[in-house]
Every structure is written in C-alpha cells, then in structure tokens.
Image (tube, rainbow, N blue to C red):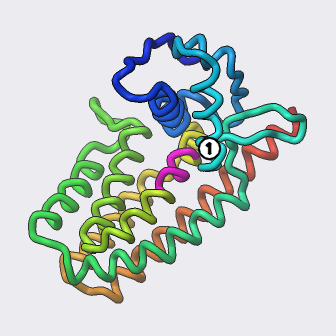
C-alpha cells in the first residue's frame, strides 16, 4: 500500500521527520510487513530529497524495523515465528516483574483505569450493533499492558517494555487479519485485573504468565500459518 503524498514541515530536521513518519507507518501497518522500500518513491511521497530518507532508513534498520532481504532488496521487517517467540519471552520476563511491582505501587486511580479498560472490552462484544473492531480491541490490550507497566513505578521497566511493545505492533500488523482470540484475551485481562485489585503479587504474576503464554502460542501458530501460506505462493 503506497503512502499518501504528504509535505513535511521544516520545523525539525527533515531526517527526523522522515524517520518518525516512516516509523509510524510501519508500526501501524500502513507500510506492510515485507513491503519493498524504495528511496526514490519514499522521497517523492514525503516531498523531500533522498538524503533524509536514506538517513531515516538507516535508523529504521538499526531498530530492526527494516532489513535487506537475501536478494538485496530493502523491505519492512517481517517477524518470523522464532522472532515472535523471542519477543514473547522478553514480555514474559518483564511483565511478570511489572505486575508484581504494580501490586505494590498501583494507585486507586490506576486501578480504576485498568477496570475501565477491562469493562470497555467486555461490554462491547463482537456481533453487537456497535462492536469493537479487532484493531480497537488490540489497542485496548496494548493500553492495559502499558498501564500495568506504568503502575509498577519503575520508569526503566516501562522504557524496556516500550521497546518490546513497538515490535509487538509490527507483529500485530502482520497477524491482524487472522482473527485474534478476542474472548480469551478479555477473560485473561479480567483475571489479571482482579489479582491486581487484591494486590496479590503471586496471583497476578501467575495470571499474566498464563495470559502471555497462551497469547504466545496463538500468535506463533498464526505466524507459522502465514509463513506456510507464503512459501506455497
């Protein structure tokens, strides 16, 4: 899917603006996993010279959001089943720590926000007149997990998880069409919230471990199916 033509303002460096624009397009799926990235085309779309595009692409490669394939073609990174497994292993380690700390540090206001996120997902199931789309439900999932990290009171932990969550957005754009297990996610979030509300660190850690382990299995299965389909093409 080509990016729409958009003129960048010269308030910041063009390289920084090009990087931020392309990074957002990749993480939201506007530039799809596996899509070819051509400097000249991107420069024309963003109405800048090729130099800031080339510098922006270098930053994206450093973040593993773009990579050169075996044929020498630059493409948006595609997350493999092995990559997905590694990402979830990082989440399992970091989010168990986050939820244990959150049980000690979470404020009443944060608990209320977490409850609202759980209720918002539960009270608008798919199939009703105004259902939440898969994108909206997965956005709620991100907000829920990010708020738990913030509730830990550990800014370094939040920063580390933000890096993982960025890659999860890339993975999400890759697997979104494959019907995520929405009902299971809702039930798992409620269990995690209930443990947090009770300030039960062991129970919260177990709940988030079970949630992420189940999610890991679902996503790896989806990625493997997509890879198998691509290989048959």
Q: Quadrant of residue 226?
A: top right
Q: Is 212 within the magenta?
A: no
Q: Check disc 1 and report its element: helix, strand or loop.
A: loop
**Is 198 above or below relative to 148?**
below
**Residue 147 as seen in the image, left or right of residue 1:** left
Residue 130, horizontal then vertical, whole percent = 27, 31
**Is 166 above or below relative to 158?**
above
The quadrant in which the N terminus is found is top right
**Residue 1 as seen in the image, left or right of residue 134:** right
- What's drawn in magenta, residue-wise? 165-170
Q: Of 28 and 179, which appears nearest the observer?
A: 28
User: Of helix, strand and loop, which mostly describes the magenta segment?
Assistant: helix
**Residue 17 as seen in the image, left or right of residue 87:** left
Q: Of 116 and 126, which appears nearest the observer?
A: 116
Task: Name the outermost residue toward the left.
Answer: 108
Residue at the image point whose x is 71% and y is 22% from the top: 38
**Is 213 above or below relative to 139?**
below
Residue at the image point whose x is 29% and y is 50% from the top: 121
Residue at the image point whose x is 37% and y is 53% from the top: 141
Q: Which residue is mark 1?
A: 65
Residue 43, horizontal then vertical, whole percent = 60, 16
Residue 144, horizontal then vertical, whole percent = 31, 58
Q: Is 168 within the magenta?
A: yes
Q: Quadrant of residue 191?
A: bottom left
């Amino acid at each position: 899917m080509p990016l729409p033509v958009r003129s960048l303002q010269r308030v910041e460096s063009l390289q920084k603006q090009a990087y931020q624009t392309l990074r957002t397009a990749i993480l939201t799926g506007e530039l799809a996993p596996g899509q070819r990235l051509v400097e000249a085309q991107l420069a024309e779309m963003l109405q800048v010279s090729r130099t800031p595009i080339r510098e922006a692409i270098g930053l994206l490669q450093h973040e593993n959001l773009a990579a050169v394939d075996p044929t020498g073609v630059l493409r948006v990174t595609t997350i493999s089943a092995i990559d997905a497994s590694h990402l979830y292993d990082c989440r399992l380690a970091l989010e168990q720590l986050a939820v244990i700390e959150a049980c000690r540090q979470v404020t009443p206001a944060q608990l209320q926000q977490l409850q609202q996120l759980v209720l918002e997902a539960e009270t608008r199931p798919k199939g009703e007149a105004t259902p939440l789309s898969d994108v909206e439900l997965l956005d709620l999932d991100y907000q829920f997990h990010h708020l738990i990290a913030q509730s830990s009171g550990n800014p370094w932990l939040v920063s580390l998880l933000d890096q993982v969550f960025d890659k999860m957005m890339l993975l999400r754009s890759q697997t979104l069409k494959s019907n995520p297990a929405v009902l299971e996610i809702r039930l798992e979030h409620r269990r995690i919230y209930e443990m947090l509300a009770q300030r039960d660190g062991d129970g919260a850690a177990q709940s988030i471990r079970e949630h992420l382990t189940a999610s890991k299995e679902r996503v790896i299965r989806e990625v493997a199916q997509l890879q198998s389909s691509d290989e048959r093409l």
